[in-house]
Amino acid sequence: MPSVPLKKAVVKEKIDVREECVAEALRIISQNGLEALSLREVARRLNVSHQAPYKHFPSREHILAEVMERAFSSFTQYLKAAIGDGDPRGALETIGRAYLEFAMQHPLQYRLMFGTPLPDLKEHPYLFARATEAFSLLKEAIRVIKTDASENELTSDALFAWSTVHGLASLTQIGSFSLLGVQELDQRDKAIRDIMDHICRSINSQ
């Protein structure tokens, strides 16, 4: 009597549901916008039970906070890598240029960080910590230049530098340079270089 071949057992590859949820949430935002994000949609796209994401994230706000926290973390690491072991006195300009590069290379993460209302930071203290880490890097870069500055002065200078570079990044992201009559790439790059120089000279001269 011929033997009946045994069927191979089908082994389902285990997935890290928490990590998959975060990755899928970012894909949903990228493809369909922030309004499309829900834990039920995450579950549907991952083909898991609709309750599975809730084991890791109590609400939509919690998974959004996780996605944003990771964006801030990547942003801060990008700035730190740019500073590296270079001359601390040049860190201010380096941070400004790295800020612009990150905005251009990672537009979705940039919009999530600076174009999305933040969840309640009291409910998500780790997000608050990540969001302020990059600002602290900027303050420390200014402290190297202005060793006698008070905390209030450092904060004021950092806000001036940050808001100016943020404006540049926003103009770059939405293509407003053309609207302002700055058509050529070399014109735009020169404008960015000049503005970065103005920021550094302004802070250095105070």
Image: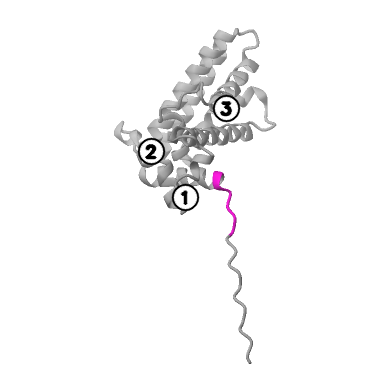
* Between discs 2 and 1, the one toward the N terminus: 2
**CB-based contact (under 8 Å), mark 1 and mark 3:** no
In the picture of the structure, the residue carrying the numbered disc 2 is: 34
Task: Tell me where the magenta segment starts and ends, as one range.
Answer: 13-18
Q: Distance between the residues labelled 1 and 3?
A: 28 Å
Residue 191 visible in this rendered orientation of the protein: no
Q: Mark 1 points at which residue?
A: 49
Q: Distance between the residues labelled 2 and 1?
A: 22 Å
Residue named by callout 3: 126
Closer to us: 135 or 177: 135
Instruction: Please report the residue visible at 38 percent of the width from the left and 32 percent of the height from the top.
Output: 171
- Assess whether mark 3 and mark 2 are in contact (beta carbons under 8 angstroms): no
Residue 173 appears in which quarter of the rendering? Answer: top left
Q: Does the magenta stretch include residue 131?
A: no
Please, what is the three-letter code of the amino acid marked with disc 2? Leu
As drawn, the residue found furthest toward the bottom would be: 1
Residue displayed at 54% across by 36% down? 70
Q: In this view, does 146 lie above or below 57?
A: above
Q: Which of marks 1 and 3 is nearer the N terminus?
A: 1
